[in-house]
């Protein structure tokens, strides 16, 4: 089959201007929405950068470079790209363990993985990741983000803060006496501004208003009463002189580095794919448009290869910023590109003013982000569900919070697979039949209604109901050891077997051999064309005898009766 790149990669922007329906009115709408979304993204980019263990400048660079590239190469009309809260935990862990160069390599590797996922048309497959896993690790990330922000929210000046979740909370409880009440009041004020503002005005985010109000209040406290607050400037004094846009820098990549960073890179890629495609699906539901998931994955991959070369961190499509774009009139990927240009102008000309932003204000913004991200209502709703889903949900959540996000995703997927196999095993049955019925659907040319069929003496009939796969091994064993003295022929009815795998083939072959050794003839009935094709591929049809394999039970019984006559 000939591979055509256009079938998996054709960015929405590329076809935009070929259409006659994109006019100056829509361009003006995109420009306005882009400016608004750019301003909205400012506090989030700065906060996500600091929380991820890098500088606020790197958070902005990510929003600029990745935001532009995701809109330029992406498969959605509306998706706005940039750093998101989902990456905070994994990025902070990589930076702490491998440094910034390690993060750059891991992000580039994740970009390559995303491109390969798109080229191999795995965009639709990502949607099949079990929902409890997505909810579990998202809630876990939210709790972890909240935990990391408690320090700045309370104004603690910790120098020996443990890196793990339990250690951090232990530290907080033992240092409650060291709370800086001024910082704590500023954090609460920021929280209050965001909550109250969002109740009355939806289009302009409360986080932006909180950033302006709390920064202004901090300056007043400092100038009038001499109150010193922890600010971006106290943590990153180099920003006071302004920042030039960085030149690309390629890190040294070795085989050893690739081996060490393979797991984190895979986690980044999966997170990026899940979050971006979920955001694109939400946008489709609101607007009635359709995104191209494979193109989106390739676009995300390109962005995550190029962005780290400028010092950026992993990026993906952001649901909140995407919805802000739609709500403010965004019509096309042009909105995302304009938002990136607005952030670039802020980076080049306004960064010296960012040093006055209090860390307590950023902490309050991230606390709100963590709350919105937690999806606690969905989490509580899923706790009412099936025990298997609840198990996956709880384990994924706890592993994300207590151990590591990478381990949580891997274990969650593995546990979901195991529980899925268990469910299939429960639905797949092997049972002995005392009576037989046949329906119009099964024997269209034999009868018109359900009809009871007699089982001749000396014949056992077993029916397999469900996929014939490795999970049925123990149940098939029951047929092998179960034999009545008068049994001469055993019919295996397979009308409800949609497919058979190689392990099922091996089990069937073993069943037939052991049954024949006991002098019992094996007959298969109700074998559908797909199953029969598999049997022929492995040569099982010849071992059983092609004259002992039937598509329906009626001819199988007729043949069995003739064979019983010859055995008398």
Image: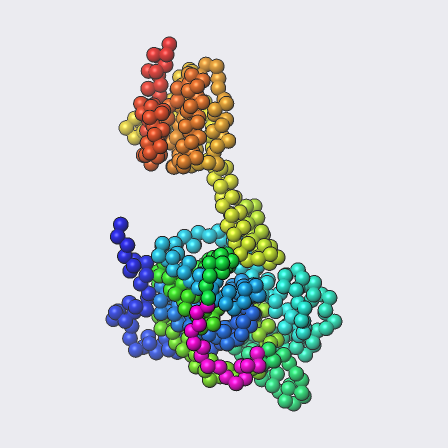
Q: How far across and how far down the image is residue 95, in percent?
A: 55, 66
Q: Which of 105 and 353 is in front in this view?
A: 105
Q: How far across and how far down the image is residue 71, in percent?
A: 38, 69
Q: Quadrant of residue 301?
A: bottom left
Report how many numbered discs are placed on residues in the image: 0
- Give the farthest residue toward the bottom: 224
Q: Is residue 544 above or below residue 325?
A: above
Q: Residue at x 30, y 30 (%)?
A: 444
Q: Residue at x 52, y 85 (%)?
A: 241
Colour pattern of the rendering? rainbow
Q: Quadrant of residue 142?
A: bottom right
Q: How far across and how far down the image is residue 445, in percent?
A: 28, 28
Does the stretch in magenta take in 248? yes
Q: Which residue is drawn at 40% across and 32% down?
A: 505
Q: What is the span of residues highlighted in magenta in the rendered image? A: 236-251
| Residue 505 visible in rendering | yes
Q: Nearer the viewer, residue 500 or 428?
A: 500
Quarter of the image that includes the C terminus: top left
- Horizontally, residue 233 falls left or right of residue 38, namely right
Q: How far across and how far down the image is residue 394, in percent?
A: 58, 52
Q: Which of 161 and 400 is in front in this view?
A: 161
| Residue 377 visible in rendering | no
Q: Which of 250 and 306 is in front in this view?
A: 250
Q: Residue at x 53, y 56 (%)?
A: 406
Does the stretch in magenta take in 215? no
Dominant SS of magenta comes to loop
């Amino acid at each position: 089959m000939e591979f055509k790149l256009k079938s998996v990669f054709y960015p929405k922007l590329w076809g935009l201007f070929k259409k006659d329906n994109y006019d100056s009115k829509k361009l003006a709408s995109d420009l306005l929405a882009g400016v608004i979304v750019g301003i909205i993204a400012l506090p989030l980019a700065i906060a996500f950068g600091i929380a991820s263990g890098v500088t606020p400048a790197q958070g902005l660079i990510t929003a600029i470079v990745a935001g532009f590239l995701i809109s330029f190469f992406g498969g959605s009309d509306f998706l706005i790209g940039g750093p998101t809260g989902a990456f905070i935990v994994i990025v902070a862990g990589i930076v702490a363990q491998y440094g910034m160069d390690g993060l750059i390599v891991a992000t580039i590797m994740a970009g390559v993985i995303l491109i390969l996922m798109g080229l191999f048309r795995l965009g639709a497959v990502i949607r099949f990741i079990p929902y409890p896993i997505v909810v579990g690790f998202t809630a876990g990330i939210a709790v972890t983000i909240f935990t990391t922000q408690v320090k700045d929210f309370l104004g603690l000046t910790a120098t020996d803060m443990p890196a793990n979740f339990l250690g951090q909370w232990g530290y907080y409880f033992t240092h409650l006496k060291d709370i800086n009440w001024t910082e704590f009041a500023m954090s609460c004020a920021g929280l209050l501004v965001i909550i109250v503002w969002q109740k009355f005005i939806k289009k302009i985010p409360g986080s932006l208003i909180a950033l302006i109000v709390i920064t202004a209040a901090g300056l007043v406290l400092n100038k009038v009463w001499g109150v010193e607050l922890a600010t971006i400037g106290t943590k990153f004094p180099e920003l006071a002189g302004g920042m030039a846009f960085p030149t690309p820098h390629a890190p040294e990549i070795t085989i050893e580095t690739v081996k060490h960073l393979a797991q984190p890179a895979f986690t980044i890629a999966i997170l990026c794919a899940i979050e971006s495609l979920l955001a694109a699906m939400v946008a489709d539901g609101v607007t009635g448009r359709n995104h191209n998931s494979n193109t989106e994955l390739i676009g995300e991959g390109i962005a995550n290869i190029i962005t780290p070369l400028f010092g950026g961190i992993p990026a993906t499509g952001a649901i909140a910023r995407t919805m802000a774009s739609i709500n403010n009139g965004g019509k096309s990927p042009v909105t995302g590109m304009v938002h990136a240009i607005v952030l670039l102008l802020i980076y080049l000309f306004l960064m010296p003013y960012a040093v006055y932003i209090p860390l307590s204000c950023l902490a309050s913004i991230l606390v709100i982000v963590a709350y919105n991200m937690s999806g606690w209502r969905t989490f509580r709703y899923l706790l009412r569900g099936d025990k298997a889903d609840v198990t996956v949900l709880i384990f994924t959540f706890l592993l994300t919070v207590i151990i590591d996000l990478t381990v949580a995703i891997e274990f969650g997927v593995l546990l979901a697979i195991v529980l899925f196999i268990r469910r299939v095993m429960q639905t797949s049955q092997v049972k002995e039949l005392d009576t037989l019925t046949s329906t119009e659907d099964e024997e269209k040319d034999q009868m018109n209604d359900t009809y009871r069929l007699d089982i001749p003496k000396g014949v056992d009939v077993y029916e397999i109901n469900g996929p014939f796969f490795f999970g049925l091994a123990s149940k098939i064993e029951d047929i092998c050891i179960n034999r009545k003295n008068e049994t001469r022929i055993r019919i295996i009815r397979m009308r409800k077997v949609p497919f058979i795998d190689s392990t099922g083939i091996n089990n069937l072959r073993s069943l037939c051999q052991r049954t024949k050794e006991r002098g019992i003839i094996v007959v298969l009935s109700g074998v559908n064309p797909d199953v029969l094709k598999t049997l022929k591929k492995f040569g099982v049809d010849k071992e059983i005898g092609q004259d002992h394999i039937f598509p329906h039970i009626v001819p199988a019984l007729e043949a069995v009766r003739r064979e019983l006559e010859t055995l008398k």
